[in-house]
Amino acid sequence: MLSTLLAEGSSLSELLLENPWPLVVALLAVSAVLRTVGKRQDQPKAVSASWLALLLGLGVYVTATLVNTDRETLIERTEALIEAASPADEAALTALLADRVVLMGPGGDVWADLSGPVIAGRLDQYRVEVLDLRGVDATINRPGYGVSTMTVSHDAMGQRIPATQWEVEWQIDPQGRWRIIAFKWLKYGLNEPSSNLYR
């Protein structure tokens, strides 16, 4: 029930699980005010309410610490993808991929079918070294399906090349693991890439 509610309300999920600090601080402040007022004015109900606010604040913090949202999981797996790419780790790459993965151009046209060995081979062939990963974000479009975005700066064949921007499409497999089903290459520097760049 809670997971369904959180999946439907991304702002609620973010408030409770991804960025709980404003709520936790607010609950602790309310607790402090209620306790102070309750003791000064001899109001046991206010003191009791202060304990409730304190426990709620601690509960929100513990829950946020223990629970990873799907969005947080996709961001972590996107970062794991980049770690597996430099240096190329074929097994780690394969573990992140679905049985069929496609490379698409910015318009969504399919350029190639990919696999862990194919990706690792390309990375090794061009001696790709990731220098910087930034702008990582993720959205859950519907249950079991999400998209992460990233911008990557890297060297290839010993030369700095323009930053690339990507959308990575994810889907939950039958075992409940998020797997990549598609890479959409959005930008090569300031320009849209063409299929010739991949070849």
Image (cartoon, grey):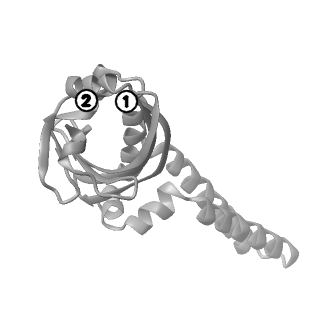
Q: Residue at x 18, y 47 (%)?
A: 195
Name the quarter where the N terminus is drawn: bottom left
Name the quarter where the C terminus is drawn: top left
Q: Are marks 2 and 1 in contact (CB under 8 Å)?
A: yes
Q: Nearer the viewer, residue 175 or 145?
A: 145
Question: Can the viewer see residue 45?
Answer: yes
Quarter of the view holding residue 60: bottom right
- Looking at the picture, which amino acid does disc 1 mark? Ala
Q: Is 70 left, or right, of 67 in this rendering? A: left
Q: Is 185 left, or right, of 102 in this rendering? A: right
- Looking at the picture, which amino acid does disc 2 mark? Ile
Query: Is disc 1 surrounded by few (<14), some (14 to 19) or many (20+) residues within 10 Å?
Result: many
Q: Residue at x 23, y 34 (%)?
A: 97
- Give the SS element for disc 1: helix
Q: Which residue is mark 2?
A: 119
Query: Is disc 2 surrounded by few (<14), some (14 to 19) or many (20+) residues within 10 Å?
Result: some
Q: Residue at x 19, y 44 (%)?
A: 196
Q: Position of residue 13 (x, y in %)?
A: 42, 61
Q: For the residues marked 2 and 1, what is the alpha-carbon distance in whole angstroms?
A: 8 Å
Q: Which residue is farthest bottom?
A: 41
Q: Which residue is mark 1?
A: 85
Q: Residue at x 74, y 72 (%)?
A: 34
Q: Position of residue 150 (x, y in %)?
A: 40, 50
